[in-house]
Amino acid sequence: MLEGTLFKYLFEIDQACNKRMEIIVPAMAKQEGGTEALKAADQIEWVRRMNSIRNRAEEIIRTCIYLNERSRCKIDE
């Protein structure tokens, strides 16, 4: 199928998105207080915050891909 170029392209996008998630999620968690101290004190609140952070990070990355703004959103780093 297209000499494997589609799968290669999708794999590259997936890798770039995963790298970006590894950067965005910890940065947002730090900024919003998703710390190990909160995790120890109130696990439910920590899970709620981390789920919210992860969902928003995924939305940021999805928006960049849909709008084909990878260079502006630095997804290809």
Image: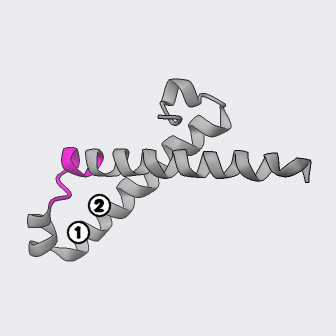
Question: Closest to the observer: 12 or 20?
Answer: 12
Question: Closest to the observer: 20 or 40?
Answer: 20
Q: Mark 2 points at which residue?
A: 49
Question: What amino acid is found at the position of numbered circle 1 in the picture?
Answer: Glu
Of all residues, the one furthest to the top in this rendering is: 72
Q: Where is residue 52 in the image (x, y as percent from the top left)?
A: 37, 58
Question: Closest to the observer: 72 or 43?
Answer: 72
Q: How crowded is mark 1: few (under 14 residues within 10 Å), some or many (20 or more)?
A: few
Q: Is residue 76 magenta?
A: no
Q: Residue at x 28, y 51 (%)?
A: 26
Q: Which residue is drawn at 37% across and 51% down?
A: 22
Q: Position of residue 41 (x, y in %)?
A: 9, 73
Of all residues, the one furthest to the front in this rendering is: 3
Question: What amino acid is found at the position of numbered circle 2 in the picture?
Answer: Arg
Left or right of residue 31, residue 8 in this image: right
Q: Quadrant of residue 55?
A: bottom left
Instruction: Judge whether 41 appears above or below 31 on screen.
Output: below
Instruction: Judge whether 26 appears above or below 41 on screen.
Output: above
Q: Is mark 1 on a helix, strand or loop?
A: helix
Left or right of residue 6, residue 22 in this image: left
Q: Do the residues labelled 2 and 1 touch (CB within 8 Å)?
A: yes
Q: Which residue is drawn at 36% across and 54% down?
A: 53
Q: Quadrant of residue 37?
A: bottom left
Q: Which residue is drawn at 49% across and 41% down?
A: 60
Of all residues, the one furthest to the right in this rendering is: 1
Question: Closest to the observer: 58 or 8?
Answer: 8
Bounds of the magenta segment: 28-35
Q: How many marks?
A: 2
**What type of secondary structure mainly makes up the magenta span?**
helix
Q: Where is residue 25 in the image (x, y as percent from the top left)?
A: 34, 51
**Quarter of the image that includes the N terminus:** bottom right
Q: Mark 1 points at which residue?
A: 45
